[in-house]
Image (spheres, grey):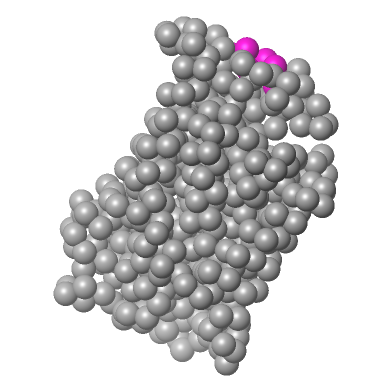
Amino acid sequence: MSNVHIDPEAVEEIVGGEYEREPVPAKAQKGPKAFWGMYAGEHAAGTEFMIGPLFLAAGASLKDLMFGLLLGNILAVLTWRYLVLPIAMKRRLTLYYQLEKVAGGNMVKIYNVTNGVLFCFLAGAMITVSASAVGVPFGIRFEVPDATFGLNGGAFTAIVAVVGLVIAAVAAAGYSMVARFANIAAPWMILVFAACGVVSIAQMDAHSFEKLNRIWNEGVAFVQVTNGPADFGLWKIVIFAWLCNAAMHFGMADLSIFRFAKTKSAGWAPSVGMFLGHYMAWICAALLLAALIATNPEASLGANGKVQADPGFLAWNALGWTGIICVVIAGWTTANPTIYRAGLAFQSLFSNAPKTTGVIIAGVVATIAGAFPNLSAQLLGFVGTYGMILGPMGAIIFVNHYFAKRLGFHEDAAAATKSGFNMAVLLAWLIPAVPGLWLILSKGVFAAYLVIPAWIASAILYVILGKMMFPNKSQA
C-alpha cells in the first residue's frame, strides 16, 4: 500500500508544473490505460511485504483474510470510482489547488505540513523494509523492540542511515530516473510476490486448502503463544482493506490523478492495484510467515522471543537472493517518491529556498523514523490513522462541490471571499480529527474504524459552519 503513484510523466504534470493552477484541458487528458498501469505499480510495493505477515501475526484466519480482503477491496474501488472520479472530472483541479480555493493558501500550508510528516513516517517504514533485506546477507536481523522508539542495535541503525540517505539523495537529484525504473520493476515485483506464495505453499507441502488452512491456524496459534493473544476478525479486515487508502479516496488526494481522466472507465483502474497488491500480494506475503513458522519456528523468533514479521528474512527464506533484491527494490521505489512528495509539501514553507530543501528535510525525517522498527510494525494502525487525519479534508471538498450552492453558502469560500485562511475548514477538520487521534493513542481504538465517522462529522460541521460564516443569499 503505497500512497504515491510512480508514473513519471503523470507525476511531473501533477506536482511538477503543468496545469498546477488551472483545469486540465482536453488535449492533456489520458485514456484508461495510463491509470491501470499507474495503480498496478502503486499497490504492489514495499509495504505489502510488511502488511501481509502482520495479518497472520495479528491473529487473522486464512478464510477471514481471503473473504475480508475481497469485500474490502471491492468497497475501496467503488469509493474511488463514485466518490473521487466525478469531482475530479468535473473540476479537473489538483487536490492542493482545490483546497486552496476552499480553505485558503495559508490553511493549505497546515495541511501540506501534516501530509508531509505522515508521508515521512510511511517512507521511514519503507526504509526499514529495505534495510531488513540489506542486513540479511551480513547476519543482521530485523528486530522489533518493545518500546515504540526503541532502536535495533548499532549495526541495523547504521544500515537504515545509509539506505535512508541514499534514497533521500536520489529523490533530490534524480526522481524521474527512479520513477521510470520503478515502472520497469513493477511487473517483475508482482511476479515475485506470486512466487512467494507458490514457494511458501510448496515449503508447507500444502496440497489442499484444508491442509493449508490447518497449517495457517497452527501458525496463528504459535504467534498467540509467543506474542500474546490477538484478534483480527472478518469485519476488521474488511474495514482495513477498504480504508487503508482512505487519504487517497475519502480524503480526495487522488483528485490530482483523476483530473487527467478522459473517460469514466479510468475510475475502475484502482481495481488492478487492489487485487494484485492488496489481495494477491498481501496473502502471498502472509504465507511467507506461515511457511517459516511451519518449517523452522525458531527462525521466526526475535531476540525477545516473539515472532517477528521480518520482510527481508522472510523473502530470503523463500526465494534467496531474488527475494532480497525484490524487498530492497520494493522498499526503495516506494520510499523514493514518498520522500519526493513529502519534500514538495515541506517546500511550501520555504518559497525562497532551493527546490531540494524540502526533499532533504523529508529524507532526514524519514530516515530517523526508519531507525525505529516498531513504527513499521505498526503499519496496520498507522495507515488508518493517516486516513482518519486526512480523510475529513475530502469531506469538506465533497460538501463544497455538492451542497454549498444548494444550501446557500459560498462554494470555494476562500476564493469567493478572497481569504487566505478559512477558519470553518480548520474547525471542521480538527474537531473530529483531534478526538479521533486521542481515541487511537489513548484508548487503543483501531484507527480504521474512525475514518468514516470522522469524515461524516467533518461534512456535517462544514455545512453548519459554512452556512454561518459564508452565507450567500444569491445562491439560496
Residue located at (53% from left, 39% from top) = 321
Seen in the image, is 345 located left or right of residue 162? left
Q: Position of residue 89 (x, y in %)?
A: 26, 64
Q: Position of residue 439 (x, y in %)?
A: 71, 46
Q: Position of residue 214 (x, y in %)?
A: 55, 9
Residue located at (48% from left, 56% from top) = 333
Q: Quadrant of residue 169?
A: bottom right
| Closer to the camera in the image, 378 or 50 | 50
Q: Which residues are the magenta region? A: 217-223
Q: Main secondary structure of the magenta part?
A: helix
User: In the orientation shown, which residue stands out farthest toward the bottom?
Assistant: 352
Q: Position of residue 442 (x, y in %)?
A: 78, 46
Residue located at (68% from left, 68% from top) = 364
| Residue 219 lies within the magenta run | yes
| Closer to the camera in the image, 411 or 238 | 238
Q: How many marks?
A: 0
